[in-house]
Amino acid sequence: MPKSIAALLEDIRLLGEDQFQMVEAVRALVKQTVQPLSEEVKYGGILFSSGLAFAGVFAYREHVSVEFSHGARIADTEGFLEGAGKGRRHIKLRTVGDIKAKKLAAYLPLALDAARKAAG
């Protein structure tokens, strides 16, 4: 049976309170920015969908990563995207303040648009 979001959040809280706070802040921002929105636990993180999957948030020991499914299609004018693969890009968050500092809110609609364009 797939893990529930609540169970995953409990695991993240055990990993660290900072990671838990960052994940919750990312979730709140995504919910505020993208409508309609659904969440599901997949690949060890929380995937965000709005008709189709466009991003996810994953907690690690040293940081939280916001992954963009089609991030390579995003024009990264701010310069915060990391990664060099064919499709995905991510933004690493080390503090809650990085959410604002790395302008995550600006990337969310771009990520959704990139996913829609990739779907054709």
Image (cartoon, rainbow, N blue to C red):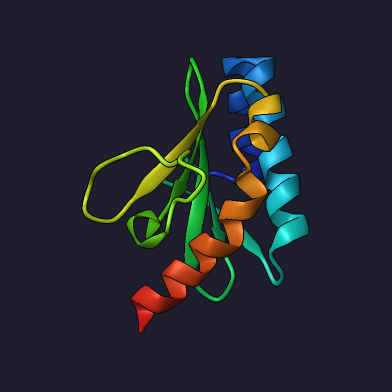
- From this viewpoint, is residue 44 visible? no
Q: Residue at x 67, y 18 (%)?
A: 18
The image shows residue 90 at horizontal and vertical percentages of: 42, 42
- From this viewpoint, is residue 82 visible? yes
The image shows residue 97 at horizontal and vertical percentages of: 70, 26
The image shows residue 105 at horizontal and vertical percentages of: 66, 50
Q: Residue at x 40, y 77 (%)?
A: 117
Q: Residue at x 59, y 56 (%)?
A: 108
Q: Residue at x 62, y 17 (%)?
A: 14
Which quadrant of the view contains residue 39? bottom right
Q: Which residue is more in the foreground, 16 or 114?
A: 114
Looking at the rendered image, the quarter that the C terminus falls into is bottom left
- Where 86 sits versus 5, above or below? below
- Where 76 sits versus 83, above or below? below
Q: Which residue is more in the foreground, 76 or 10?
A: 76
Q: How many marks?
A: 0
- Where 44 sits versus 119, above or below? above
The image shows residue 38 at horizontal and vertical percentages of: 64, 63
Q: Which residue is more in the foreground, 54 or 89?
A: 89
Residue that sits furthest to the front in the current view? 77
Q: Which residue is more in the foreground, 68 or 75?
A: 75
- Where 104 sits versus 63, above or below? below
Compared across the picture, whether 10 is left or right of 83 comes to right
Which quadrant of the view contains residue 44? top left
